[in-house]
Image (cartoon, coloured by chain):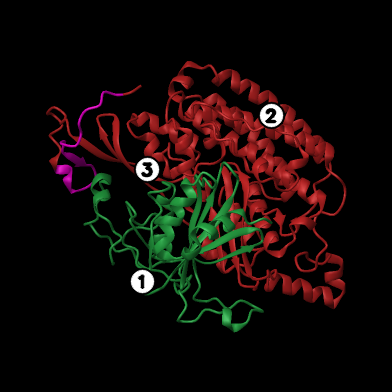
Amino acid sequence: MSLIVLDALQAKHGQALDRVESIHGDEIAWVKRDALVAVATWLRDDPTMLFDSPVFVTCIDRIDWHPVGAPPSTWWTEDKPRFEVCYQLRSSTYRYRIRLKVAVPEADPRCPSLATLWPAFNWQERETFDMYGIKFDGHPDLRRIYLYEEFVGYPLRKDYPKEKRQPLVRRDDLPINPIKARQTTSGEER
Amino acid sequence: MAAPTRDVTSLKQLVLGRKDVQDLADTEQELPPDLMTVNMGPSHPAMHGTVRIVLTVDGERIVASDVQPGYLHRCFEKESEHATYTQVFPYTDRLNYVSPMINNCGWAMAVEKLMGLTASIPKRAEYIRVIVSEMSRITDHLTCIGASAMELGAFTAFLYFLKAREWFYELLEKVSGARLTHSYVRVGGVGKDLPDGFHDELTRTLDQTVKVMEEVENMLNNNKIFRDRMAGIGAMTKAEALATGCVGPIARACGVDYDVRKDYPYSIYPEVEFDVPVGTTGDCYDRYLVRIEEMKQSIRILRQCLAQIPDGPVVVDDPRVALPPKRDTYNTIESMIRHFKHIVDGIRVPAGEAYTFVEGGNGELGFYIVSDGTGRPYKAYCRAPSFVHLSTAGQLIHDHFIADVVPIFGMINMIGGECDK
């Protein structure tokens, strides 16, 4: 498996990467949080890359990470970042695929938004925010998408119990109107 | 079809169903020229499944909209994290419930990729997977086109297509035992072999379906009402389709030549011959034409598969994933233990992560699994094409009439189960 994209990325943005790996043929680049937008913009616009098609955004919560058979040094500990935000991209011209990963600590769950580069990430980042509580800086419309605004907590985090139930307490102050709703953002602390 | 545009920024906005309603003028007076915000859905005959669209309209013209999915959210990912890899199959059935076999295959392939089993799946199992996948693709497109035609008033086309869909469902029921939620595919192969007489029945069904499609095409293709409602409505350019992540028939209608079966070939698709239809205008009518042509190509694939399918086992002979034969389970203690461990602990998947994608009814359907070496996925993410396509709906219906929401929405083919996960 040739690693064309990873090699090019390392040559061009080596200082912006924490490390690169290739698992089962999937190319993965760990990008520093501050450099994500620059790396992503380069991947989109460079004529040898042309990652014009976004695939998905998701997040991994590593708080329970104790893989079987792996040395304890790879287990999650308090000093390691808890979340990994994953961006999967595709180049329709060259058929490349790459996954960008950004480590996000629990104390500061923020990640730069790529929704302005690829509009598809608008909803997918909203989904990640809804499920994991990652706040995407620069997102044009960061609201919950699957759940209702009154929901407390982030259900796909590992510390949210599967069986947990919570009552729906209606709030009447939420905007229903889309034009108004777009001007207020619920990405603030709740 | 373009409505006269006027400056809407200065107009007052009325919201129905909220406190602002008292601001509405008395019904006996003249209707106010203000913008009005109305709800379409979540429970609306034209909203397949349940989705809510908050529309701000200037008369009949949409000036702003907010599409809100989530009314069918069943926590696919959270439930999957607590289920063994085999127990996830029934959950995947309920993602895109019009083409469950493709979801089954996608999940199985993702687990096999993590286990390094991709190359060792028996040929016959691969052929059976492609056969049931293509049958599912046909049922998916039949439903999409039939339902959309019905919403535009063509009830006959709907009944004809649902009749054809029922033939496929009956056949899939014979294969898997369930009409809708098949759970037929397994990690390492498929659950059981095809039933006796399957070849003849499928051949007969395909012949009948071709006739039904001819009838419906004669009814719809040049039907004035159908074309007026579809052509030029909800058009998208190629660049927009790529940037918004559209895949499948919607992207192909815009001229994006991308089909996972051709671009990243998997299973036995390289061994069969088929074409990928591509549209030019990217409007609803092109999406319809692309889907019709895809069904014809699926029929072509099915006929080749029936001619080429080899004999042999339908599940890989690997004790890590395959259940021992029933005969041994009941008669030897070793097989009994293996069976028990397999069911209770689940298939042990080595730690790692993998993203696998297949061409679903709506496009690239992907599963991203992170495994920590136990029998249950640490994380299971589903890349649902419907969700991505629905995110473009707000942009597609902008500046159209309320009546145009119906064909645009029908051709996006949002499947509630897949979109809301």
Which amino acid type is shown beneath numbered disc 1?
A: Asp
Does residue A127 appear in this view? no
Q: Colour of chain A?
A: green
Q: Which residue is mark 3?
A: B41
Q: Which residue is mark 2?
A: B209
**Mark pair 3, 2: CA separation:** 34 Å
Q: Residue furthest front?
A: A11
Q: Secondary structure at mark 2?
A: helix
Q: Nearer the viewer, residue B300 or B98?
A: B300
- Quadrant the N terminus of chain A occupies: bottom right
Q: Position of residue A72 (x, y in %)?
A: 59, 83
- Quadrant the C terminus of chain A occupies: bottom left
Q: Dot 3, crowdedness within 10 Å: few (<14), some or many (≥20)?
A: some
Any magenta on residue B19? yes
Does residue B147 appear in this view? yes
Q: Which mark is residue B232?
A: none
**Disc 3: which chain?**
B
Q: Main secondary structure of the magenta part?
A: loop
**Mark pair 2, 1: CA separation:** 57 Å
Q: Position of residue B420 (x, y in %)?
A: 47, 52
